[in-house]
Image: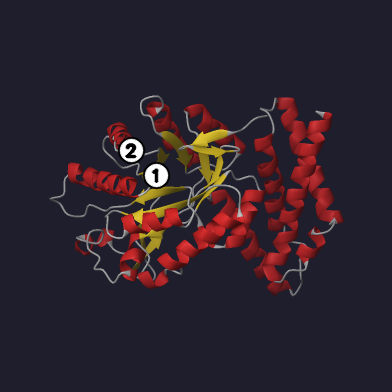
Amino acid sequence: MDLRTTYMGLELQNPVVASASPLSEKLDNFRRMEDAGAAAVVMFSLFEEQIKHENAAIEHLITSGAESYAESLSFFPEIEDYETGPDEYLNLLRRATEAVDIPVIGSLNGITNEGWVETARLMQEAGASGIELNAYYIPAKVDTDGRNVEQRYLDVLTAVKAAVSIPVAMKLSPFFSATANMARQFDEAGADALVLFNRFYQPDFDLDELEVHRTLELSDSRDLLLPLRWISILYGKVEADFALTSGVHSAHDILKAMMAGARVAMTAAALVTATAAGLWASEEEAVRRGAKDPGPVVVDEIAGQWLTYLVALPFLPVLTSTHLVVFTAAGFLLFRFFDVVKPWPIRACEKLPGGIGIVADDLAAGYFAAFALLIGWKIFV
């Protein structure tokens, strides 16, 4: 089945894109995402605060007024919490574009032009195939009206578009009072794609510590409904491509995004949850039981089994109910075979230290099972 598509002018082998997440902080993960079938990768966001901190500039447009309201405190991580500055980010971007054959899209997070224009140019020079503007603004001042807020977003988009020749996507907030009108304004300002919707750091009160903590909850499939509705409403009314992000956790979610009119579906939470939970839980239990790969730990096998289906399903035609049963059973049996037999290099992965070794062999078995499933499907179905 031909799954090729285009997204903001980029030729993609399929509509599945790895969205901005901590997975893109490591070079090896770019190769893994490409091997898993991702058609493109959006890098984690370079925050405006990092650019300003690097340039010794004074922050005020994002934090202006925030200290006046208890609910507004501590939305962003402290500057010292960032592990990657602009130079490190650009170096990783350059190395990633050299390491993989799929497009790598840079991501900028902020709401002013300070540092953005020059950084966007540097991203282009580093080899980025496109840029995603992940704009974020808290209008805490009571005399700031909606028109002023909208203009800030448009100014950033216009400035970046004028500075680079690669395509630029605008990641929208779900909180605009007139989402359809705002989408049209972004389209008229030259956005090559609109990404629906952004997810934000939110403040919460810790009743034990009496402090405000920042949280960013991972999505689940219920979060798919809001972008699904708006892409359906906007499809055909603007020229820009649509990307659906937030709530993409299964092949069915991807199909729904395509039906609504999205060119691509972006996912990160499912990848982060399965991998991170497996690594942490496996290592904790191994230490507690004093065993290399304790039998009660099955989260690693769940992650590997899930990976089998995730890798294989995008390459298959739409499945009937009978085919879905066959697909599920064959994927399960093939994963169990490779997980038990452990041909090379699966057994070598098992020897890696700590939780990495516990999970890595199951993920490798998941890849092998997916490839075997695709070959078998081509021959017998």
Expressed as whole percent of the image width and height from the top left, the position of residue 275 reads 62, 57
Q: Are marks 1 and 2 in contact (CB under 8 Å)?
A: yes
Q: Quadrant of residue 294?
A: bottom right
Q: Tag 2, which secondary structure? A: loop
Residue 216, picture quadrant: bottom left
The percent coordinates of residue 355 (x first, y second) are 68, 67
Viewed as shown, does residue 331 lie left or right of 7?
A: right
Q: Nearer the viewer, residue 10 or 250?
A: 10
Q: Is residue 359 above or below residue 239?
A: below
Residue 327 in the image: above or below residue 204: above
**As rendered, which of 148 and 215 lies closer to the eye?**
148
Q: Which three-letter amino acid code belongs to the residue tagged 1?
A: Val
Q: Choose the circle earlier in sequence order: 1 or 2.
A: 1
Q: Which amino acid type corresponds to the residue marked 2 in the rendered image?
A: Gly
Q: Residue furthest left?
A: 143
* 207 vs 52, nearest the viewer: 52
Mark 1 surroundings: few (<14), some (14-19) or many (≥20) residues within 10 A: many
Measure the C-alpha gap from mark 1 to mark 2: 8 Å
Q: Which residue is mark 1?
A: 168
Q: Quadrant of residue 56?
A: bottom left
The image shows residue 163 at horizontal and vertical percentages of 33, 50
Q: Is residue 235 left or right of residue 365?
A: left
- The disc placed on residue 296 is none
Q: Is residue 53 left or right of residue 327?
A: left
Residue in the foreground of this view, choosing between 130 and 339: 130
- As helix, strand or loop, the secondary structure at mark 1 comes to strand
Give above or below for 369 relative to 318.
Answer: below
Identify the residue shown where x is 45% and y is 33%.
228
Q: Is residue 285 visible?
A: no
Give x and y (percent) for residue 146.
Answer: 20, 43
In the rendered image, the vertical position of residue 355 relative to residue 319, given as above or below = below
Q: Which residue is mark 2?
A: 190
